Image (cartoon, coloured by chain):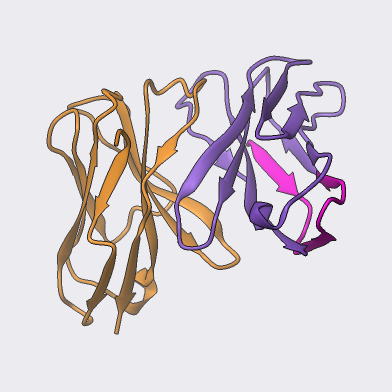
Chain colours: A orange, B purple
Amino acid sequence: NAGVTQTPKFQVLKTGQSMTLQCAQDMNHNSMYWYRQDPGMGLRLIYYSASEGTTDKGEVPNGYNVSRLNKREFSLRLESAAPSQTSVYFCASQITRTGRDGYTFGSGTRLTVV
Amino acid sequence: GNSVTQMEGPVTLSEEAFLTINCTYTATGYPSLFWYVQYPGEGLQLLLKATKADDKGSNKGFEATYRKETTSFHLEKGSVQVSDSAVYFCALTPLGGSYIPTFGRGTSLIVHP
């Protein structure tokens, strides 16, 4: 099925551990995004990639890094996890950065840092 | 800056009731407007959109009209079902700049049989 695929779906980390969240889309979209969703905070943008080869910081980039590996894949890395990074992480994509068509979201990665 | 304000939830309705979820926005120019729906344990799904003033977006019985004069994009459905229980997010994408969307905080809808 066409769409945005995120892996893993669930993860528990210990404080200080690192991990990479994977995201891939098969819709030939140019722009990709990483959000976190926390109760009462709504969606907050972490990083985005307007097109292959570019990445930019969003609202809450501290503690994260990203890689736009190719047009399909956009990964999010936590170098040293902290309990404040416990959240649900969503990857999204859209055909162009101008945003007239809206996002397609993945099903999320539920991360707990203990 | 841009902002989106949604009514606080939860909104609790009986099946077949009429639904309105209010959304107002602040932005310069003519942003694109969206409603997304999030079912429990899932990601957000695009429900409908409108890209210019007076446009009406519609999908699955839901409708919303882009009202420039009142800067609003209220979501409506004539007869809700239990399966409509979800969280609904209003969002805008500005015309220009970084084109980064602004999302509302979400409104939870609970429909009872």
User: How far from the left and from the top, in percent, is residue A88?
Assistant: 40, 63
Residue A56 appears in which quarter of the rendering? Answer: top left
Q: Nearer the viewer, residue A111 or A98?
A: A111
Q: Does residue A98 appear in the picture of this structure?
A: yes
Q: Quadrant of the N terminus of chain A?
A: top left
User: How far from the left and from the top, in percent, is residue B32?
Assistant: 61, 23
User: How far from the left and from the top, in percent, is residue A84?
Assistant: 38, 74
Tell whether B100 sits left or right of B107: left
Residue at (84, 50) in percent of width and height: B16
Position of B50 relative to A9 (above/below)? above
Q: Residue furthest front?
A: B113
Residue at (15, 75) in percent of width and height: A17
Q: Quadrant of the C terminus of chain A?
A: bottom left
B18 drawn magenta: yes
Which stretch appears magenta?
B1-20
B8 drawn magenta: yes
Q: Nearer the viewer, residue B14 or B11?
A: B14
Residue B57 appears in which quarter of the rendering? Answer: top right
User: How far from the left and from the top, in percent, is residue B84?
Assistant: 67, 52
Tell whether A13 sits left or right of B53: left
Residue at (47, 52) in percent of width and height: A44
How many marks do you count on the picture? 0
Q: Does residue B104 appear in the picture of this structure?
A: no
Position of B97 relative to A45 (above/below)? above
Position of A51 relative to A63 (above/below)? above
Residue at (45, 56) in percent of width and height: B42
